[in-house]
Amino acid sequence: MEQKILNTNNLEETLTEAISECEHESIFVLTDENTRKDCWPAIKDFLVLRNATIISIQAGDHHKDIHSLMKVWEQIEAGHATRHSLLINMGGGMVTDLGGFAASTYKRGIDFINIPTTLLAMVDASVGGKTGINFNGLKNEIGTFNNAHCVIFHTPFLKTLDQQNLLSGYAEMIKHGLIDQERTWAELMNFDIATPDWRLLSELVMKSVKVKQRIVKSDPKEHGLRKALNLGHTFGHAFEEFSLKHDQHPILHGFAVAYGLVAELYLSSVRFHFPTDKLHPTVGFIREHYGRLSFTCDDYDELIDFMRHDKKNHDGQIITTLLAGIGDLRLDQSVSEEEIKEALDFCREG
């Protein structure tokens, strides 16, 4: 089933219609502490939500864990939910991932609607049917494939974000541009993310979502083409897990993906001659806006160990997605420890 995406300027009308299409003997709204403060006020007085139960969890990807999941289950249970209840996930990717998993597993599955409020959630986490939590220090280790009834975009929510969270989502858009076509990539490289034109950003968001939708529709369970969406993520997830373990203020997911793109584009250039006139502007854009992750050569073995736990791996090989050119995919590429260390050198020094 293709994911239903609704882009709206009339959030109350769109949400009311979406709820009417779902079973909803009772309605629960999941937020984190940030969206409870910044976004819940925009919908709390909607007539359709007058009897809804609000559930709020702590913000941050390090809280996307079994403890937060249990809190959601417990509060749904305390609200006398049935198999005909509805969960509305309003927040960033952490909320839509965890909330989608909670809904998918409670009483073997209840309907849920995603209202992404961050750029990262709009272009990545809330779309495509992946739900889950982190487990034992590993990203998204437990989860399901299950589409929300619909995903509702209300891009004015983006104005509530700080620059770091805008950049986090924009990294996934850069990835979509790289796996799509040169025109898409060029538009993203030329956009001024530091002082965004909100109307143009909204248009770019919808183009980015369409790239992901097209890929997910053809390969919903990630057996083939959907692996393209993993570009930047083999290294990126390792960077993210490394930062979660060592940094007092861990990097955001999109920053990890941006650094992962640098590493994997470097490997693409070495193995498949990815064009330097596309490599250098992309790496330059990332370094200008995202900086560099702080690590040393003494950390390489730990980073490689994180990569060994990646779900994409098979037969003991570390597997990644590379490119021969923009939109020219090379899926299921096995990379050696020597190649990984060379790419890490490039991330630090290149």
Image (cartoon, grey):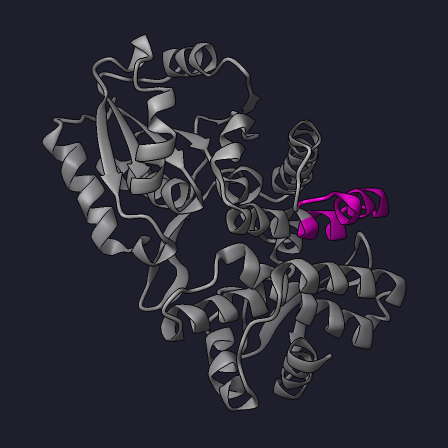
Instruction: Name the side, left or right, on which 196 lies relative to 245.
Output: right
Asked if residue 252 is positioned above or below residue 316 in the image, the reply reads: above
Report whether 42 appears left or right of 281.
left
Direction bottom: furthest residue: 298
- The image quarter containing residue 1 is top right
Q: Residue at x 71, y 31 (%)?
A: 200
Numbered marks: total = 0
* Quarter of the figure with the C terminus: bottom right
* Residue 336 at x, y percent in the picture: 64, 83
Question: Magenta: predominant secondary structure element?
Answer: helix
From the top left corner, tell me how far across and down residue 106 is, in percent.
24, 38
Residue 341, image quadrant:
bottom right
Residue 284 shown left or right of residue 261 in the figure: right
* Front residue of 35 and 28: 35
| Residue at horizontal 82 percent and vertical 66 percent from the top | 280
Q: Position of residue 205 (x, y in %)?
A: 64, 35
Residue 189 is inside the magenta segment: yes
**Left or right: 180 with respect to 12?**
right
Q: Is residue 92 magenta?
A: no
Instruction: Identify the magenta region.
Output: 174-193
- Residue at the image point whose x is 67% and y is 45% from the top: 193
Residue at left 13%, top 34%? Answer: 77
x%, y% of residue 108? 27, 37
Name above or below for residue 67 compared with residue 44: below
Q: Nearer the viewer, residue 205 or 316?
A: 205
Quadrant for residue 140, please give it.
Answer: bottom left
Relative depth, front residue between 70 and 314:
70
